[in-house]
Amino acid sequence: MSESRYDWAAPWPSTSHGVEAYLDVPRELIPGALAALREHHSARLTSVFCEDRVMTEQCFYNYYVLESPAQRAYLVLRAGIPASDPVFPSVSAAFPSANWQEREIQDWFGLTAQGHPNPRRVALHDNWPDVHPLRKEFSAVAELPFAGEQHVYRPTLGEGVFQIPVGPVHAGIIEPGHFSFSVAGEPILYLQLRMFYVHKGIEKRFEQLPVGRCVALAESISGDSSFSHGVAFCQALETVAGLEIPARAEAIRTILLELERIYNHIADIGAIATDVGFVIANAHASRLREMLFVLNEGLTGSRLLRGMVCPGGVRRDWNREQVVELSETLRQFETEFRDLMDIIESSDSTRDRLEHTGVLPTEQARELGVVGVAGRASGIDRDVRRDHPYAAYRHWTVDVPVYTEGDVLRRMMVRVKEIGGALFLIRALLASLTDGAHRVPLPPLEQGRVALSAVEGWRGEILHWIRTGPNNRLERCRIKDPSLNNWPALVEAVKGNIVPDFPVINKSFNLSYSGTDR
Amino acid sequence: MSSYILSFFAQLLLLLFLPPLVGGFIKTAKARLQTRRGPGLLQPYRDLAKLARKSMVIPNTASWIFHITPHVLFTSTLLAGLMIPTLSTRPPLAIVGGVLAVVYLLALGRFFLALGGLDTGSSFGGLGSSREMTISAIAEPALMLAVFTVAITTGSTNLGSMADQALGQSWRFLSPSQILAFAALLIVLIAETGRIPVDNPATHLELTMIHEAMILEYSGPWLALIEWSASIKQFILMSLLINVFFPFGLAADWSLPALAVSLVWLLLKLLLLAVVVILVETSNAKLRLFRVPELLAVAFVLSALALISTFLF
């Protein structure tokens, strides 16, 4: 097999179903292929993952998911890795965005990423014994011994340089993660992150449950993105089954996706204000968020929009009163939201704290493959809703706000603009809401089918990739939460800032621990 | 003699039991401005009582400094409090010290608090101590210059006679030096009491704290002592501000009827000042840490100008 078999400059193969095209590439050609695709198509490597097919095909498969501005489809390169020689060439040096994901493959599948610049463990902590939980032969109920903390942080050297360890247990109700700051006085020289304290083995769990129960599992990947993850998972199932869902279901899903975006964005705007001590803005933001929670409960029975999405559509339909309630609440919300933004924008002291704080330059954002809100604030003009439309986004154009400054203020402004866009979109969807069925039954799944599903959650691009197995079960489910792409960017954004500005920089990214750890 | 004893105990009781109420008022009023209900006026008392009943966790690395800090802080703050005019123009301890003693007693407390923060070797304590000292290095001279301005006009550093003098003259406040000195002291008050825009007393984020970071390792009764001292210190600085610049209503002696009248005045003036603090705190975001010295430099310049203008006008 030679390099000449592939023409990387050619347009990507089109796809009849779903959002992705597949291409088998020998593993040794992967680094070259990725580099060529980046050169010819400005392709971004968004996810790298592995699948254990040893029982049927005596090999593992590595998948490289790429996305390009000029192409409608995702391109998935597949490389077979024989079980007898479990090694693959690392691409992390050239594509830093693959760093953690290649190490996940090392930890979970026991393959070796050859030439990885930092091959330490990431997803399984150092105290884990030598097991590889996503291999088929690993039993999910196995009890493993806990050997105690063994992680060694990179030491910080130099006159007057200190380390400040923060976490994994924090003040306030947030999830565990360890931040080790190296500081010279107040300025931060370097931040070491450690995640995966609450690794729950969700990807393994998907392989054990019947698909009906998997939806609830998908909803619990990251609590604040319940609906987005639920939709991403259901879309993957529908693609596998070749199922078209009714227009009304698509519209309802889209409205709820946007509602999820609004309630998270408004909470973040308030939280950013809190972290600079402008508490009055948070008081109003919390009130507005509560207004949406009550609305959510009226529309779906759950304040966090859980239990609403199901394969084939949505679980319950809306009556006339609910639709009226929705548009009335949003009208009131919009007025009060404008007032809140007036308060925030008229506060010079707040602007002074947010502007030029935590700058993530475009070049670094691109290298690290930053997605979503954080990416758009740093000049990465990508949005799954516009670039790979799904559900009702196929019929509507989505305004994508983009800034190039990449500071905390711009990450907040992206959220502000997106709330405006979401309100507009919901109104348009409501005006054109048609009657009809709200769900269709999902037929039994054919064995051995694969599908990729992409959703723009409020944080950014969510990917679910599934392979079906026998008896309506899954053989593999890969979940990529946007937080997995964006955590390393936080390290870049805080460099050179002062320690007391870290909380607001962190909050402006507001990444999910649970979605990263899975 | 009996009136002296009365004055001593009256002021002591006032110092011990009024300051938490001021803190409670600020918290509750702030909450109301933020459309919250707030903890209630008496919450600081309940907090102190709760902490006093709890057992303590003392880090293994703590030395004797950690142990004596709460006591030194509390004693020095109380002593300073007995030297300032609160109800009467005759503070009980005015005979042993004037404004210089007040400033240095407060500095002594802060010095030990900073040592206590460093003592355990925790990184947050160190951060807090270094920040506190950075800020006080500028806040303290500004405070002293501002008070000296008044001292020069009145010809005394004894706070009682300063208030006495001020009482005698009508509308002295309108003189330029007094206005400048008042503005400077107001900034110092906000900085020294750890309020927005300098420090955020309500935050749970260790990385942004100043005062709270120093006392993170304290718990139980010792924490209660430190919290209590902090509220007394806030009361001292507020009383200093209102009674030096707006002394009307102060009793000239320690007779009971006069004290009752001056207590009403004191509460009224505290209320007004607290409202100013609350409005500043609610309408501003916290300053970036490195901008805080700039704000305090403003206070310093204001008080220097105040001092110069006493000789000009």
Image (cartoon, grey):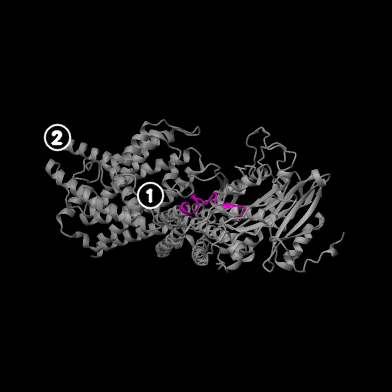
Q: Is residue A302 magenta?
A: yes
Q: Quadrant of residue A388?
A: bottom right
Relative side of B108 to A41, left or right: left
- Specify the subunit that label 1 lies on: B
Determine crowd level at label 1: few under 14, some 14-19, many 20+ residues with C-alpha closer than 10 A.
Answer: many
Q: Quadrant of residue B254?
A: top left
| Discs 1 and 2 lie in a common subunit | yes
Q: Which residue occupies the extreme front position in the image?
A: A436
Disc assigned to residue A398: none
What residue is shown with label 1?
Answer: B194
Image x and y of residue A8, in percent: 78, 66
Say which amino acid is labelled 1. Answer: Gly
Q: Would you place residue B8 above or below residue A508 in this image?
A: above
Give the residue displayed 22% in from the left and 43% down from the top: B94
Relative side of B174 to A180, left or right: left
Disc assigned to residue B2: 2
Q: Is residue B15 magenta?
A: no
Image quarter where the N terminus of chain A lies is bottom right
Image x and y of residue B306, in percent: 29, 61
Q: Main secondary structure of the magenta part?
A: loop
Say which amino acid is labelled 2. Answer: Ser
Give the residue displayed 35% in from the left and 58% down from the top: B299
- Specify the subunit that label 2 lies on: B
Q: Which residues are magenta?
A: A297-312
